[in-house]
Amino acid sequence: MRKRLIRTLIAFLVAMTAAFIYVEKIYHWLVRGMDEQLVLLGPSEVMWVYMIIAGVVAVTVTLPIAAYQIWRFVQPALPDGTHRSAMQLIPVISLLFIAGICFGYFVLFPMVLQFMQRMAEGQFQTMYTAQKYFTFMIHMTVPFGFLFEMPAIVVFLTKLGIVNPHRLAKIRKSAYFLLCIVAVTITPPDIMSDLIVIVPLFLLYEISVSISKLIYRKQQLLSQAEGSIS
């Protein structure tokens, strides 16, 4: 375990160093839609902003490496039939994380930001600090990277026999309720914003259930075939 953690940490540091080299270009791309420059309240704040941008890029790059190291660590305990399928999930995990980040950045973040700006228009003089702006952006994007991992997690747990489509269907109402709480918590207080977030989360859950059904059915057929042979 220690060896896996060290390798993952080294990969993260290398990715963060590489991202830091291009952090100014990334910063200018992220603030390309701003009418005014962001404000710094202290000399060290620019370093905090650059570090947090490089950190998010490094997490995205390191995620498949971390998933691979976790797979290698748990591989001896996995059933023989799950080794290949677990390995195939690693690129899927990366793609789902990037998809979640993109959803948060291109859909949720501008929607919430415009809502806040409309609330302040004509009543307050808006002046965004760099730290507050990027903290807000990260809160609107990074959590969705992890939420979009739902199908990959369900696939892996189904292959291990921990969950099955019957259990997922049984807890559907509770899962929907939790997803609604998440959506309402991170979106502005209007029904359209809530729906824009709730619908993709519900779809992710239903996709997870459908994939679990396919895997579970395949496992049942394989077990029946092995039973008939024996």
Image: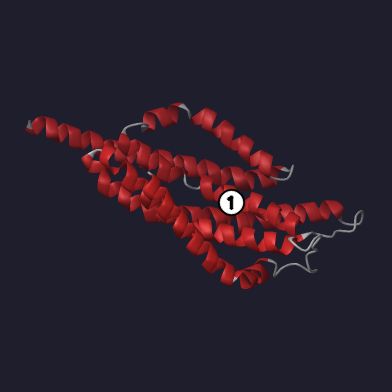
- On the image, the x and y values in percent for residue 192 come to 68, 46
Residue at the location (22% across, 42% down)? 81
- Give the farthest residue toward the top: 170
Q: Which amino acid does label 1 sit on?
A: Val
Say whether residue 78 is visible.
no
Question: From the image, which quarter does the C terminus lie in?
Answer: top left
Query: Considering depth in this image, is 179 or 16 the residue closer to the camera?
Result: 16
Density class for disc 1 (Cα within 10 Å; few <14, some 14-19, many ≥20) is many
Residue at the location (42% across, 42% down)? 153
- On the image, the x and y values in percent for residue 62 come to 46, 57
- On the image, the x and y values in percent for residue 134 come to 69, 57
Query: Considering depth in this image, is 103 or 25 the residue closer to the camera?
Result: 25
**On the image, numbered disc 1 is attached to which residue?**
142
* In this picture, residue 149 sits left or right of residue 69: right
- On the image, the x and y values in percent for residue 44 come to 74, 61
Question: From the image, which quarter does the N terminus lie in?
Answer: top left
Residue at the location (86% across, 53% down)? 120
* In this picture, residue 107 sits left or right of residue 58: right
Say whether residue 7 is visible.
yes
